[in-house]
Image (tube, rainbow, N blue to C red):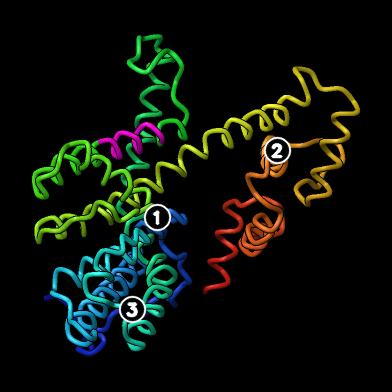
Amino acid sequence: MFARRPERNALLDNAQPPADPPTPTRPQLNHFHSISISDLDASDRSPQCYAALLVLAYFVLGVLYYSYLAAPEKFTLIDALYFTVVTITTVGYGDVNGDYKLVDTSQDKLFTALFVLLGVGIIGAAVGVVLSAILDREDELAERLSRQQTTETVRRRPSLLGKKALSPAQAKCVVSAAQLVLVLLGGTLIFERLEHVSLLTAFYWCCVSVTTVGYGDVAPETFAGKAFACVFLLVGTVLMAKSLGDIAGLPLEARRKRLEKKVLEQYGDHLDGEEFAEILRYAHSQGLCDSATSCSKTEFVLSMLLKLDKIDKDDIRPCVQAFDHLDSDHSGRLDAGDVLAAADAVV
């Protein structure tokens, strides 16, 4: 009744149509996050780890030698640790030396001489690396204080520190001074309690110690006092040095701001022909501008940063080379054409 359909080969029935030849595809864009030096520095803790191990090795060396090898009389463990701290902080009371007659033998003289050089030089720098990581939090606090003062000034609200906002250097001084005062007060109270001396004597010892003067007329004598001194000297001397550095930076910052103001205001409120020609000439001399008739905002900003000594020409050159490497079509701009050209090169 119905015409029989011709039988087909089962292989043909199950065969799939030929696939199209593969076409090159563009690489998918991922979520890229740029990095900066501060990002890398925050994530790299190896310098602090190496410095901490070096400081620990120095303390172990000092404690082991003066406790087990010193002649003619070996130190107690607390005296050996106390002597090591007094050495590395350059306080040098001289109390332990006299008690144990440290300089009576050539062996102890030679070891102590090398120990002092090592402690003041290499280990002193290592201690600075370790404690600088801790003091970075202080700088962050100072920056927050400075920003808060600036915000309050803009809003014209009364401030505890006056109507004028604190500069970053001034904020650092405030934070450093506050920390130093707390350390001196705490050290005075604790030393007075442990060594059973007057508050004035305890305060005198704290001041002489944190400034690394170390007259030696007042020094801890008890086990608890020496143990406390080991911690107090390390913290107090670093905070004192930090405070002095911040105070010394105040006049330098004021002078720097005066000079920067002169540089920024050298063109006044209106630009004349000579000033415009100088801007173009300087931008061309630094390799920042290609146009002979105009200067972009970016080119002007980079020129001013160079004049302010915020950056150096050697800082710009590697950045320009990195840009030229990414600028595939040499258009002077990074755009979608550079992305497509890079994708074609990969395929």
Figure quadrant of residue 126: bottom left
Residue designated by label 3:
103
First along the sequence among labels 3 and 2: 3
Residue drawn 37% across and 61% down? 90
Q: Is residue 24 above or below residue 91?
A: below
For marks 2 and 1, give the CA distance: 26 Å
Q: Quadrant of residue 39?
A: bottom left
Is-magenta flag for residue 174? yes
Asked if residue 106 is among those painted magenta in the image, a careful observer would answer no
How far apart are the alpha carbons under marks 3 and 2?
60 Å
The residue carrying pointer 1 sits among few (fewer than 14), some (14 to 19) or many (20 or more) residues within 10 Å by Cα, namely: few
Residue type at tag 3:
Val
In this figure, which residue is indicated by the disc labeled 1?
39
In this view of the protein, can residue 328 be seen by the observer? Answer: no
Where disc 2 sits, the SS reads helix
Q: Residues within 10 Å of mark 2 (few under 14, many from 20)?
A: some
Instruction: Label 1, secondary structure: give it.
Output: helix
